[in-house]
Amino acid sequence: MLRTIELTLHAGAKALVTGLDWHIAPGQCWCVIGPNGVGKTTLLRTLAGLQTSGGGSVELDGRALAGWPALEQAKRRGYLPAGRDDAFAYSALATVLAARHPYHAQRQWESEEDHAAALAALERLNVANLAQRDVRTLSGGQRQRVALAALLAQQTPLLIMDEPTSAMDLPGRVGVMRLLGELCRDEGKSVILVSHDLNLSYGVATHALLLMGDGAWQTGTVAETMTTELLSRCLGHPIGIAMHAGRPVYVAQEAAI
């Protein structure tokens, strides 16, 4: 699905990621973990083709990302950025319909299929009742659900998301993460997401990529990577585990004095 080969990313003179060899297969859900400023958003933007790397390459379905025409690339991967600013009074439905642009070909207007895909996505995110609302009047959590609905309506096999549950309440976060797990498990989609919630990430992710802050990285299954030792080193704060209902619960411990 997606592969990086010796990928290197910098922020000025600082090395964010060095020599990343990484492979994302269909049905896998990857969580990218790391503290602020280590390059998580830079990595996602590079995977989405929105900025260039400092070295190495990104391949989508075995072809270099730069070799994909923009419209064809938009049919293969969707990208949800961390923030948005709505300047115009679009309805929620119109916002989601905009994600159907890659399928318009020579058409000037949306088809019945586009409307059906948009409405189905809004329904799946539990915001179909907001379809005609001005997105500028929505709460942050509602607006995030509309953004996720647009991503689903794009109908790509690969979803790249920067903090997809931001601004949501607890039931909303749990529901969205459950949906992402279903997309991977039941529909064979691949998901790459950034999240600071270790417990929600553990519940949905099959794999994790840890960015260590000095260019180093760790990849593997959640069992291999989401250990107290690696997470503590990655996040720069001691992380403990408590067992509850048969699964680990991650707890930030008091920092050593």
Image (tube, rainbow, N blue to C red):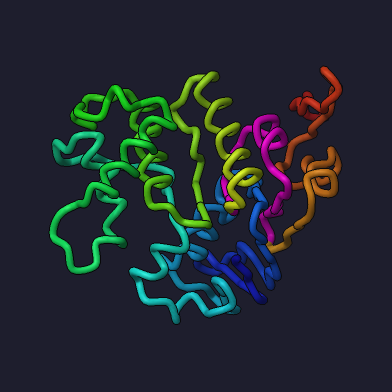
Which residues fall within the magenta stretch?
A: 190-214
Q: Depth check: give the residue in front, 199 or 11.
A: 199
Instruction: Write the residue at 43% across / 52% down.
Output: 155
Q: Pick the quarter of the image with the N terminus.
A: bottom right
Instruction: Write the residue at 63% across / 71% down.
Output: 4
Q: Depth check: give the residue in front, 215 or 20.
A: 20
**Residue 50 location, quadrant:** bottom left
Q: How many marks?
A: 0
196 left or right of 110 in image: right
Residue 34 in picture, x, y percent from top left:
65, 46
Vertical relation: 252 (above or below) 50: above
Instruction: Say whether residue 143 is magenta.
Output: no
Q: Depth check: give the residue in front, 111 or 9.
A: 111
Vertical relation: 22 (above or below) 86: below
Vertical relation: 46 (above or below) 87: below
Q: Depth check: give the residue in front, 12 or 102.
A: 102
8 left or right of 166 in image: right
Instruction: Write the residue at 82% across / 26% down.
Output: 247
Instruction: Say whether residue 211 is magenta.
Output: yes
Q: Pick the quarter of the image with the C terminus.
A: top right
Residue 11 in picture, x, y percent from top left:
51, 64
Residue 210 in picture, x, y percent from top left:
71, 52
Vertical relation: 111 (above or below) 138: below
Instruction: Write the residue at 63% across / 69% down.
Output: 3
